[in-house]
Amino acid sequence: MYRKKNPISGLKGNERIEDIFVVKIKKGIFPYVNGYYFHLLLSDAEGKNIDYKYWGEKDEAKVRALYESIEPDAVVLVQGRTAIYMGTLQIATNHPDTIKVLGEGEYDPSDFVKKSKRDIGEMVQELRGLIASVQNPEIKRLLERIFIEDEAFMDKFKQHPAAIQIHHNWAGGLIEHSLQLARYCEASKAVFPELDRDLMIAGALLHDIGKLSEIQVTTRIKGTKEGQLIGHIPIGYSTLSDIMEETKISDELRMKLLHIVLSHQGQMEYGSPKEPMFPEAVAVYLADELSSKLAEIIEFVGESKKGTEDDFMYHNRHRRNIYLK
């Protein structure tokens, strides 16, 4: 069995490579002066990408057969060397080195999808405890219907990532993220007793259920066609609306829960078709911000420390330096 040796983030120029990667995108075959080459985008468990070029000989049929044997999401063993081209790190393979597609059993899937640092069973018990603590009978019935009675839903929910790359992008990330929101909402209730705890708990646990259809896990975490075309907020709205029709929940509560799903990203420019319009919706939105932003920065600091001894590292998405010490 081949194991992943180094993350993409740890690679440097002019290094000998013999490691495994996931094929994210196939970019085609092209002629060059000495034959034919093909171009791939490779990925790893961190969600980082690197360009790859296989420089083949003049036998086009041979190069094409190798290229066509490589499917998107395949795990490949790559031999070659890193180089920096026009300021970008890439991997190149030249004869006699090669690229080989690995079959099931030749690699460990956990090398490509990170796992939660928390125990899944422990998080499931925490979620069940939250549901048991809900006092509103309508909300409690709804949560039991979704998270306890629907075993197939729960089996998927507890293993699912919360994102492809930015935050909680690991197996178990969705339940972990949802529980963090619930704890932040309970903290808000402690400061503002007038808040409806049960409504916030339900919003925290349900806000991202559309992610189950927006994201899929193969040898990597990636978006589904439905996720790309529709998005997790409309999917979550539709899913929750259908379930609430089944459970005959009151109109007022139905509208509030759906509003929380629609507004949990806070602003229209961030994907929410509505902005939060009552205190509990604001609390869920801000809890989502805290959970996602802190998880993102904590992961960034941890990963950056592996590759540098500098005090600061530039964060491309946030466009600022992050202090690592």
Image (cartoon, grey):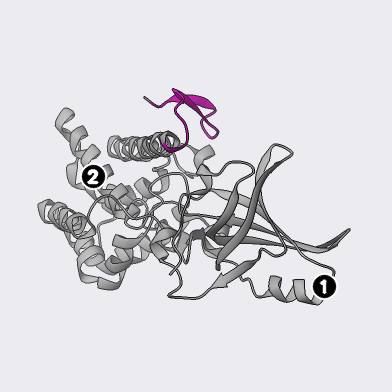
Q: Quadrant of residue 211?
A: bottom left
How many marks the image carries: the answer is 2
Q: Residue at x 51, y 25 (%)?
A: 320
Q: Which residues are magenta?
A: 306-324
Q: Which residue does the image show at 14% across and 32% down from the upper left?
A: 190
Quadrant in which the N terminus appears: bottom left
Element at badge 1?
helix
- Label 2 is placed on what type of residue? Ala
Residue nearest the viewer, comparing 94 with 125: 94
Q: Amino acid type of disc 1?
A: Glu
On residue 104, the disc is none
In the displayed structure image, the side of residue 66 where residue 190 appears, left or right: left
Residue occupying the far right of the picture: 33
Say which residue label 2 marks: 182
Q: Determine which residue is flagged by label 1.
A: 60
Q: Nearer the viewer, residue 235 or 16?
A: 16
Disc 2 secondary structure class:
helix
Q: Nearer the viewer, mark 1 or mark 2?
A: 1
